């Protein structure tokens, strides 16, 4: 369970979050929408402990992140998956090294464990064929090729999938996506939407998606939160969003759908 109470954050004179109250349901996919600059990404970074609130509380599984020390914040970050906008892969590293970097940074040196986890997450995001269907030889050939590729060798959609694979390392209970379809063509965007939905069901993880893409919202959301001027303007199902008579919501949908 993720609960946010009275969350405020300013950068200099600019008040970005002005008192967010929000509960994210456990399981399924919650999409957070709103105009550019309304505080979506800032909110997400508070939930994973990348930013510290000026006021208010963020509870994750009943624990207040505000009270965490540095070690507890690091442990929190190891227990959640975060897919950055643009994938944020390291250009100088191979796909394999990008995927397992968090394990290596936290001291994992067992090459068999690293290899096994890379295979698992690359298969989960569709970058490796099922071993049972392709046969061992074909599977090993595909794995040998994909693991050594650099980000510059990949399409936009493949880079997104590698970013998602990295977020799945360690089997997190929560997966956070920051604008996962930004910069992608409609077909690839649909593929990423399908991937997000499939992972939410197969992994039974709680997914939180920051997006401006309303087609993605309609495709994958179980719950929708709309921010406006640093506050929660709407919280409910997709059906309730579509039926809303709130002038701010109506105007937003008219502009972005």
Image (cartoon, rainbow, N blue to C red):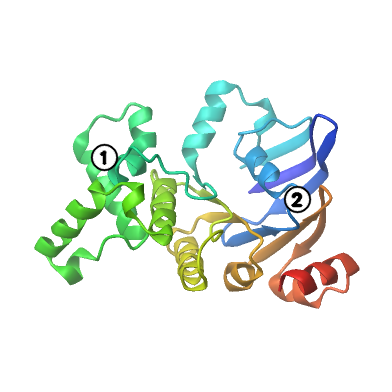
SS at mark 2?
strand
Q: Tell me if residue 73 comes above or below residue 139 in the rendering.
A: above
Measured as percent of width and height from the top left, residue 74 is found at 51, 29
Quadrant for the C terminus, please. Answer: bottom right
Question: Looking at the image, do the residues carrying marks 1 and 2 touch, with CB atoms under 8 Å apart?
Answer: no
Q: Which residue is mark 1?
A: 114
Furthest residue toward left: 137
**Residue position for label 2:** 22
Determine the residue positioned at 63% across, 65% down.
213
Give SS at disc 1: helix
Q: Is residue 186 left or right of residue 130?
A: right
Q: Residue at x 28, y 44 (%)?
A: 96
CA gap, disc 1 and disc 2: 37 Å
Instruction: Report crowding for label 1: few under 14, some 14 to 19, many 20 or more residues within 10 A (C-alpha).
Output: many
> Does label 1 or label 2 sit earlier along the sequence?
2
Q: Position of residue 116 (x, y in %)?
A: 24, 46
Q: Is residue 18 visible?
A: yes
* Residue 62 shows in the view: no
Figure check: 226 above or below 149? below
Residue 202 drawn at (x, y percent): 43, 63
Horizontally, is 51 left or right of 101 in the view? right
Classify residue 69 by image quadrant: top right
Left or right: 91, with 141 as reference point = right
Please tell me whether mark 1 or mark 2 is closer to you in this view: 1
Residue at coordinates 65% horizontally, 57% vertically from top-left?
Answer: 25
Q: Which mark is residue 204?
A: none
Residue at x-position 30% and y-position 39% = 97
Based on the displayed image, in which of its 4 quarters is residue 12 positioned? Answer: top right
Residue 218 x %, y %: 63, 73
């Amino acid at each position: 369970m993720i609960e946010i109470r009275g969350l405020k954050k300013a950068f200099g004179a600019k008040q970005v979050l002005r008192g967010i109250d929000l509960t994210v349901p456990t399981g399924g996919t919650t999409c957070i929408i709103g105009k550019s600059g309304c505080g979506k990404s800032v909110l997400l970074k508070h939930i994973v402990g990348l930013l510290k609130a000026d006021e208010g509380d963020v509870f994750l599984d009943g624990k207040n992140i505000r009270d965490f020390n540095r070690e507890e914040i690091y442990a929190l970050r190891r227990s959640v998956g975060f897919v950055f906008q643009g994938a944020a892969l390291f250009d100088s590293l191979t796909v394999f090294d990008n995927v397992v970097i968090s394990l290596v940074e936290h001291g994992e040196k067992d090459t068999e464990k690293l290899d096994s986890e890379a295979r698992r997450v690359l298969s989960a995001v569709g970058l490796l064929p099922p071993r049972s269907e392709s046969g061992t030889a074909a599977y090993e050939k595909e794995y040998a090729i994909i693991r050594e590729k650099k980000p510059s060798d990949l399409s936009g959609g493949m880079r997104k999938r590698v970013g998602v694979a990295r977020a799945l390392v360690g089997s997190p209970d929560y997966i956070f996506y920051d604008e996962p379809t930004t910069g992608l063509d409609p077909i690839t965007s649909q593929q990423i939407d399908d991937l997000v939905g499939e992972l939410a069901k197969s992994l039974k993880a709680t997914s939180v998606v920051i997006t401006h893409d309303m087609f993605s919202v309609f495709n994958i959301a179980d719950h929708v939160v709309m921010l406006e001027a640093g506050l929660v303007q709407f919280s409910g199902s997709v059906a309730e969003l579509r039926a809303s008579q709130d002038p701010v919501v109506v105007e937003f949908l008219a502009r972005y759908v």
